[in-house]
Amino acid sequence: MIQRIQTVYLALGIIALLALLFFDVVWQSQATETLVWFAPALLATLALTVLLAGAAIFLYKNREKQRKVVTYAQGALLLLIIVLFGGLTMTSELGIRSGGEPQVGRIVTLLLPVAAYILFYLARRGIEHDIKLVRSMDRLR
């Protein structure tokens, strides 16, 4: 249901994660050339996170299950962040400066999963607020 704020947060989180696909900083890095597991693990965790968040949008009628799926999506996103930062750290590409100039593409690439996690957290907080609101209304009946 689009009128709920957590749906907006989930959709923005999905958009932030899908934007990660369009930055060549990750996909044409030394980590993808050197580490055999990096690109497949990154794609798998990205797909899992997007699918979980997408499924959570359509679970608006069952708030308890929606909260659980968003929590799983947050866990998958943490795994994605570990894979991304771990792979770039192993190949010494985590630095954001190259030749004295900051690389904007790399900064954005590293911040997108963190922003998506914050958005998923806000969505889960909104779901928990709705659960408390419904419980208080049931108590008044």
Image (cartoon, grey):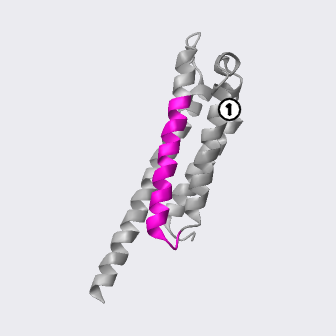
Q: Label 1: how many residues lie within 10 Å, few (<14), some (14-19) or many (20+)? A: few
Between 2 and 42, the one lying in front of the other is: 42
Q: Quadrant of the N terminus?
A: bottom right
Between 36 and 114, the one lying in front of the other is: 36
Residue lying farthest bottom?
141
Between 14 and 58, the one lying in front of the other is: 58
Q: Quadrant of the C terminus?
A: bottom left
Count the labels in the image. Answer: 1
Tell me which residue sits at (59%, 9%) in the image: 99
Q: Tell me the magenta residue range.
A: 60-83
Q: State the image coordinates of residue 55 (x, y, percent, origin top left).
A: 60, 60
Q: Quadrant of residue 23?
A: top right
* Residue identifier under label 1: 40
Q: Quadrant of residue 19?
A: top right
Q: State the image coordinates of residue 18 (x, y, percent, origin top left).
A: 65, 44
Q: State the image coordinates of residue 79 (x, y, percent, origin top left).
A: 51, 37
Q: Does the rendering let one see residue 95?
A: no
Q: Does the rendering let one see residue 132?
A: yes
Q: Is residue 63 magenta?
A: yes
User: Residue flagged by tag 1: what amino acid is it?
Assistant: Pro
Q: Is residue 42 magenta?
A: no
Tell me which residue sits at (56%, 50%) in the image: 13
Residue lying farthest left?
140
Name the chief secondary structure element in magenta.
Answer: helix
Tell me which residue sits at (49%, 63%) in the image: 66
Q: State the image coordinates of residue 134 (x, y, percent, origin top left).
A: 37, 77
Q: Element type at marker 1?
A: helix
Residue lying farthest top?
99
Tell me which residue sits at (68%, 32%) in the image: 40
Left or right, 28 with reference to 17: right
Q: Is residue 59 above or below residue 13?
A: below
